[in-house]
Amino acid sequence: MGNSLSNDKFVVKGRTVAITGGSRGMGLAAGHQLAAKGANIIIIARDREKLAQGVEHIRQGALDPSTQRFHHISADLTSSSECVRVIDEIVSWNLGNPPDVVWCCAGSPHPTLFIDTPVSELEAVMNSNYFTSLYMAHAILSHWLRTSREHTTQPSRTPSSTNTSTISAPPRHLIFTASFLAFYTFTGYSPYSPAKAALRSLSDSLSQEMNLYAAAHPNEPPIRIHTIFPAGILTESYEAENLYKSDVTKMLEGADEAQTPEAVAAKSIRALESGQELITTDILTSLVKRSMLGGSVRGGFARALGDWVLACVVTLAMVFVRHDMDRKVRDWGRKFGASGMNREDKQA
Ligand SMILES: NC(=O)c1ccc[n+]([C@@H]2O[C@H](COP(=O)([O-])OP(=O)(O)OC[C@H]3O[C@@H](n4cnc5c(N)ncnc54)[C@H](OP(=O)(O)O)[C@@H]3O)[C@@H](O)[C@H]2O)c1
C-alpha cells in the first residue's frame, strides 16, 4: 500500500482494479501492466473466450500470481442494469469490497461520413463509447459514495472510532478512455468524436462534483477522476476500421504513427502515477490539449504556466491547421466527388 510520503499517486499493489474492455487491446495491456505492479485484476467484456484468454495473459505477467487474484465477467455494458450487476459481482468476488480502481476502456470506433451512417449506427456508437462508461461510472460512484449519501445532512469531520480502516485509505480512481478526437475532430469522425468529447465533459464535471463528498466526508477515501486521450492504437479495431474508413479520412490522417497498446497503457499508467487528470500519450495530442483546456484541471501553477505558453503557440497554429484541413477536403471533393472514396484508385 502507498503512504503519504510516496510520490506515486496511483498505488495499485494489493488493490483491486476492474477494467472494462480488458479482454484485448489497450485494456488488456493495462491489465497486464497493473498485474505486474501487484494489482488484483477483473476484466469485463462480452466475448467469453477472449476474456478467458485475456485473464490468463494477465495472470502470467503478475508480480506474485500465488497471492494476486484474477477474474473476468461477461457483460454488455451498453445496458445500465448490466453495469450494476457487474459491480455487484465484483463486490461479492472481492470479499464484500468494491474495486479500488475502475478503468473504462470499452468502446469501438466508427469512422464514416455522417449521412452515410444509419441513425441506428450513430446511436450504437454513442452507446458503445459514451454510455458504457457513463453507466459504469454511475454504478461504481453510487457504490463508493454510498456511505457519504447515507449521511447527507451530517458532515463527518472527525474520524469515526468504529471505522478506522479508511482514515488513511489511498484514493479510489475512476478512469475514462476518450481519444485525440475529443480535442480535435475532422471529416469522417462525426459518428465517433461526439461520444469521446462527451466523456471529457463528464470527466470534468465529476472531478468537480467529487469535491463535495471529499469535503463533507474527509475520512472516506477520496475519488479521483481521470481521462486518457490516446491517438491511434494498433489494435484489432484499428485494423478493422481501416477497412471501411473513407479515403478522404485516410488522406487527412496521413502517415500518422499509431502506438502499440502496450506503449499507450504504459504512458497512461505513468501519468496516473504522477497524478494527472487529463492524460495524453503522444506529443501531438498533448499540444492540441493545451488549446482546449477551458476550465479543466491543470495540475498546479507551474503546469498551468507551461500550458499557457504552449496554448498561445498552438492557438495560432490551429488557424493554419484548420485552414489546411479544410483546403484538403475541398480539393478532395472537387477531384473525387462527395462519396469520400478515391474512385480513381478503386478503378485502377
Ligand atoms: N484503437 C485506436 O486507435 C483508439 C484510438 C483512440 C481511442 N481509442 C479508445 O481506446 C479504447 C480501447 O481501444 P482498443 O482499440 O484497445 O479497443 P479494442 O481492441 O477494440 O477492444 C475493445 C474492448 O472493449 C470491449 N467492448 C466493446 N464494446 C463493449 C460492450 N458493449 N460491452 C462490454 N465490452 C465491450 C471489447 O470486447 P467485446 O467485443 O468482447 O465486448 C474489447 O475488450 C476504446 O474506448 C477506444 O475507443 C482507441
Image (cartoon, helix red, strand yellow):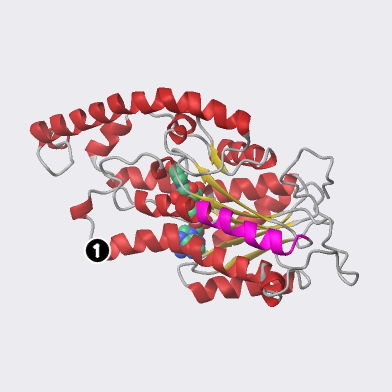
Side (left or right) of 293 relative to 221: left
Rendered location of residue 37, percent (x, y): 76, 45
Q: Nearer the viewer, residue 66 or 128?
A: 128
Side (left or right) of 296 relative to 180: right
Question: Quick one: SS at disc 1?
Answer: helix
The residue under label 1 is which amino acid type? Answer: Val
Q: Main secondary structure of the magenta part?
A: helix
Q: Nearer the viewer, residue 31 or 343?
A: 31
Q: Nearer the viewer, residue 185 or 335?
A: 185
> Does residue 340 lie above or below 173 as drawn?
above
Q: Nearer the viewer, residue 308 or 27?
A: 308
User: Magenta stretch?
Assistant: 204-218
Query: Residue at point 42% right, 38% down?
Result: 292
**Label 1 C-beta lies within 8 Å of the nearest ligand 1 atom:** no
Q: Is residue 99 visible?
A: no
Say which residue label 1 marks: 119
Pick out the residue farthest to the right: 161
Query: Residue at point 68% right, 67% down?
Result: 144
The quadrant in which the C terminus is found is top left
Rendered location of residue 258, percent (x, y): 45, 34
Rendered location of residue 301, percent (x, y): 61, 32
Is residue 211 a member of the stretch shown in magenta?
A: yes
